[in-house]
Image (cartoon, rainbow, N blue to C red):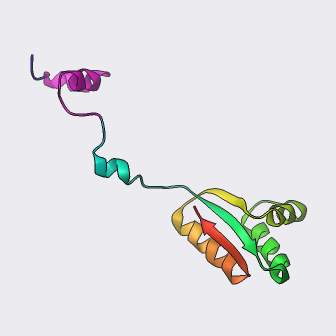
Amino acid sequence: IKELPPMAALKPGAAAVAAAMGGASAKPSKEEASKPEKTAYNLRLDSFDAAAKIKVIKEVRAFTDLGLKEAKELVEKAPAVLKQGLSKEDGEQLVEKLKAVGAKAVLE
């Protein structure tokens, strides 16, 4: 049998059978494998101006649920990840806010 009957494609595990028989490849093409699209980004604080430390702590508290002590400790141990799982748009907005108060932040 060189072709699978139409109903076989609807059954679980039929893709493995089709691949074993030389059917459609289950592996992505080189283009798809080389361009994985990120959907979740991490906001990392690299450094900050010493004079702007209080402003940076206030800004970190504004977008996290941290208290004053926790936000201060997080900012002081820079470079540190401030927030994880952000969308690209939200992350870029937060990077701009942090840069405005004197911090160097990156979206990774």
Residue 79: x percent and y percent?
73, 63
Drawn side of residue 78 relative to residue 5, left or right: right
Q: Where the C terminus falls, by quadrant? A: bottom right
Q: Residue at x 9, y 21 (%)?
A: 2
Decide whether residue 14 is among the magenta residues.
yes
| Magenta stretch: includes residue 17 | yes
Q: At x 74% / y 62%, what residue is drawn?
A: 64
Residue in the picture at 73% in, 82% down: 101
- Does residue 40 lie above or below 76 as drawn? above
Image spot of residue 76 (x, y percent): 84, 66
Q: Position of residue 6 (x, y in %)?
A: 15, 25
Horizontal and vertical percent for residue 70? Answer: 86, 59
Left or right of 9? Residue 52 is: right
Residue found at the far right of this picture: 69
Residue 67, image quadrant: bottom right
**What span is in magenta?**
4-26
Q: Quadrant of the N terminus?
A: top left
Is 68 situated above or below 12?
below
State the residue lying farthest toward the top. Answer: 1
Q: Is residue 88 left or right of residue 59?
A: left
Viewer-nearest residue: 89 or 98: 98
All told, the count of numbered labels is 0
Based on the displayed image, in which of its 4 quarters is residue 61 positioned?
Answer: bottom right
Quarter-wise, where is residue 41 in the image? Answer: bottom right
Q: Decide which of 62, 26 is in the foreground and name it.
A: 26
